[in-house]
Image (tube, helix red, strand yellow):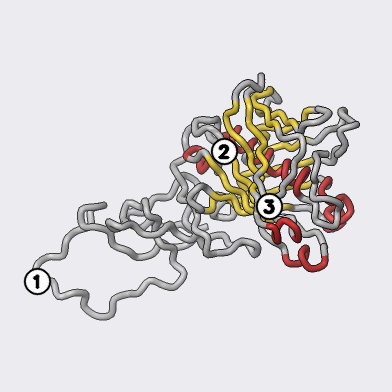
């Protein structure tokens, strides 16, 4: 990829080479060395070059933005077929030390919204397709885009219990996280082979695990670091009824005495809940939580979605009680 010489005032984080030339713009005279035109200036001589269509617009926090700020840029570098190109992307913050590449977005947020996209084929004929998710911050800016990578036979034969690989992409289309769920037993009567998911960031480098903890009544999970040491627990309700209300899975300390966050299955409306398996989740965690554990919480959200809320209306009840 040829990056060339960056335009004055542009800033790209390390490893984020521009795939498209930035838009031509001018900020306030007092910023970035922009000079005031001299008195008597008659304007440009000859036709002024117009920026080509499709150039990205600088974000509101951009050093060269005007007093009111530009809107957050719509990144054209990656537009997955399942992702609407009009959704603004969260500007990439500078990567801190010891942070896996691509996870720097998580360092500045304490809340994540996960919106599963509705697949028309599933709604019409019940054919299970690969799940796609938009992952946003509290301002509605897209942080990541997640795409399931599972073959057709596995999806439609194993249903919600299927093993899967979930690839999480940033605004440049780079795979920054990989989530892998192996095939495991979905019954609480077999505690030796319970559910789990591995979180890798970057792909191939494990940063944590989510393992199901056996309990006769409650859905419980343990969040572990890359050394498989227990760090936090997630505890859900006894009956995961999603009728007209949110369902909270609380993030707790290891002794389960204090609550430090939660994963909420949000009520999406009667029609959407009844006829689709497209779900919305909210994830809350402490702002200063280790960035790797934030990624592990994201993995826990996807595991919970598949275990309890992935079933469609023709698969009995919509996961009314935990598996």
Answer with left or right where residue 68 lies relative to residue 73.
left
Neighbours of disc 3 within 10 Å: few (<14), some (14-19), many (20+): many
Q: Can you tell which quarter of the image residue 293 is in? A: top right
Vertical side of 103 occupied by 119: above or below: below
CA gap, disc 1 to disc 3?
A: 61 Å
Looking at this rendering, what residue extends furthest in the left direction? Answer: 40
- Residue 270 is situated, as x and y percent measured from the top left of the image, at 70, 58
Vertical side of 6 occupied by 288: above or below: above
Which label's residue is closer to the chain start, 2 or 3? 3
Callout 2 secondary element: strand
- Residue 185 is situated, as x and y percent measured from the top left of the image, at 87, 37
Q: How many numbered marks does the figure carry? A: 3
Callout 3 secondary element: loop
Neighbours of disc 1 within 10 Å: few (<14), some (14-19), many (20+): few
CA gap, disc 2 to disc 1?
A: 57 Å
**Residue under the point 55% across and 41% down:** 103
Which label's residue is closer to the chain start, 1 or 3? 1
Q: Which residue lies under the disc numbered 2?
A: 284
Q: Which residue lies under the disc numbered 1?
A: 40
Q: Which residue lies under the disc numbered 3?
A: 279
Are the two marked residues, 2 and 3, in contact with CB atoms closer than 8 angstroms?
A: no
CA gap, disc 2 to disc 3?
A: 17 Å
Looking at this rendering, what residue extends furthest in the bottom direction? Answer: 46
Vertical side of 230 occupied by 65: above or below: below
Q: Quadrant of the C terminus?
A: top right
């Amino acid at each position: 990829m040829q990056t060339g010489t960056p335009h004055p005032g542009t800033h790209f984080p390390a490893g984020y080479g521009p795939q498209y030339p930035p838009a031509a713009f001018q900020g306030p005279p007092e910023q970035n060395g922009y000079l005031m035109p001299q008195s008597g200036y008659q304007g440009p001589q000859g036709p002024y070059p117009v920026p080509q269509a499709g150039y990205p617009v600088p974000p509101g926090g951009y050093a060269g933005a005007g007093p009111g700020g530009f809107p957050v840029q719509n990144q054209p570098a990656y537009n997955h077929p399942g992702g609407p190109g009009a959704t603004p992307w969260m500007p990439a913050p500078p990567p801190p030390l010891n942070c896996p590449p691509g996870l720097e977005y998580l360092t500045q947020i304490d809340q994540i919204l996960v919106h599963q996209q509705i697949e028309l084929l599933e709604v019409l004929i019940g054919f299970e397709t690969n799940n796609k998710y938009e992952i946003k911050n509290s301002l509605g800016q897209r942080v990541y885009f997640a795409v399931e990578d599972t073959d057709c036979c596995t999806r439609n034969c194993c249903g919600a219990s299927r093993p899967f690989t979930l690839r999480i992409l940033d605004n440049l289309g780079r795979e920054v996280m990989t989530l892998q769920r192996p095939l495991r037993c979905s019954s609480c009567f077999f505690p030796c082979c319970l559910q789990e998911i591995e979180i890798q960031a970057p792909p191939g480098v494990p940063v944590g695990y989510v393992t199901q903890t056996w309990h006769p009544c409650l859905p419980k999970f343990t969040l572990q670091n890359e050394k498989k040491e227990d760090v936090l627990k997630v505890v859900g309700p006894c009956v995961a009824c999603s009728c007209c209300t949110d369902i909270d899975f609380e993030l707790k300390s290891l002794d389960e005495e204090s609550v430090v966050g939660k994963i909420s299955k949000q009520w999406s409306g009667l029609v959407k809940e009844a006829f689709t398996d497209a779900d919305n989740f909210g994830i809350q965690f402490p702002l200063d939580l280790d960035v790797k554990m934030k990624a592990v919480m994201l993995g826990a959200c996807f595991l919970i979605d598949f275990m309890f809320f992935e079933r469609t209306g023709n698969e009995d009840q919509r996961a009314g009680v935990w598996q």
